[in-house]
Image (spheres, grey):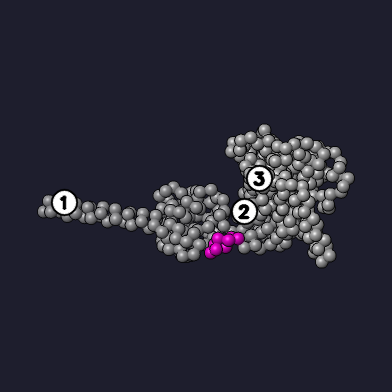
Amino acid sequence: MWRALASNMLTVLVVGLFLSGGLILWGQSRYKNEGPLETAICLQVERGSNMTEVSQKLEDQGAISSAMIFRMAADYTDKAPQLKAGSFLVREGSSMEQIIDEITRSGASTCGSEIEYRIGVTRIQTRVRELNPATLDFDEIASFDVAEEEAPAAYTEKRNDADTRYRVSVAEGVTAWQVVEGLKQIDALTGEVTEIPAEGMLAPDSYDVVRGADRNAILQGMQDRQQLRVNAVWEKRQDDLPISSPEEMLILASIIEKETGVPHERGQVASVFVNRLERGMKLQTDPTVIYGVTKGQGTLGRGLRRSELRRATPWNTYVIDGLPPTPIASPGLASLEAAVAPEDTNYVFFVADGTGGHAFAETLDEHNRNVAKWREIEAERQSSGN
């Protein structure tokens, strides 16, 4: 009798262990496999929330099949105490494992509202945007010029939202002074900037920042990024270029940046300046003259005067030989690369062609014909009022 009872108990134990193991495997499968979500959502995790509340919200929104398994998995993996507040993008088909990782990893919001401050050559534009989870594109809610327009209500609302993300974008061709002045006008930042960084050494790019970030720290990050680019690009330079240092490469790249905004022209523009340097010709480029007038503090806002073209400044390449002593703006990566890998041409002249690009020439006669065509285009535009 006792032997039969022991045998039955052993059978029950084995079955129980088998079922328990099966249950664990089933739970693991539900945890790691693709989830039921058919369309991406933006999950809002409020401050003070716990994993029980979040798991129920996810189940209600159809992102997970079981709030209980989600909660148990978060506890088992010791992730529950790491829950972060914010707005998190949950993509279609995300597993419970992926969702838990998303909401406990860094606390940086990956969806919801974003305020972007775009520092350009002529204006500082602020854009308020909202990520559309279905399309993964940003929908613009508001846009305004910080220096000239009053902030709209949408900006104030999102500015006071703790989950809003912030981004500072710097355009190619801006000067160090323009970047500093732009940062000063961003009310989400802190810290007083007392020194303008070296010209050309602020990398044009997009930077994720947090509300209350120090302006000096942001500037240092821009300088660090530009230095990395300069070092990397200089290592890839062509042989026998008429530039002898990373500093000269940066100067040449800044001139290329200011002369053309057409991507496929950068190599040709670079070739013109490289050919002129090799032949001992003056560079004769207007942006350097403008920099000598403005010192990079804003735009000229008018055409150059003949007297300014003749005036001797360290940057006037109609007067000086070779490169100016400093960059005239911050060049982007593409212009840096063009400076060390110019196209193989015999061009030594270029002029605007009326389409936004330039007409290039190997001889002065050819260049003069291109100039005549450009002047005809200018005259036609003036007569038509365009």
Q: Residue 279 sits in which quadrant?
A: top right
Q: Secondary structure at mark 3?
A: loop
Res 199 seen here: no
Q: CA distance from mark 1 to mark 2?
A: 64 Å
The residue carrying mark 3 is: 345
Q: Where in the figure is residue 280, as x and y percent of width and height?
A: 75, 36
| Above-or-below relation of 18 to 341 | below
State the image quarter where residue 141 is shown. Answer: bottom right
Residue holding disc 1: 6
Question: Residue drawn 22% across and 52% down?
Answer: 14
Secondary-structure class at tag 2 = strand
Q: Earlier in the sequence, mark 2 or mark 3?
A: 2
Mark 2 lies on residue: 165
Q: Residue at x 43, y 57 (%)?
A: 95
Q: Which residues are magenta?
A: 131-138
Inter-mark Cα distance, 2 to 3: 46 Å
Amino acid type, label 1: Ala
The quarter of the rendered structure image containing the C terminus is bottom right
Q: Is residue 170 above or below residue 69?
A: above
* Badge 3 amino acid: Thr
Residue 44: x percent and y percent?
Answer: 55, 59
Q: Amino acid at mark 2?
A: Arg
Q: Report the disc number at residue 331.
A: none
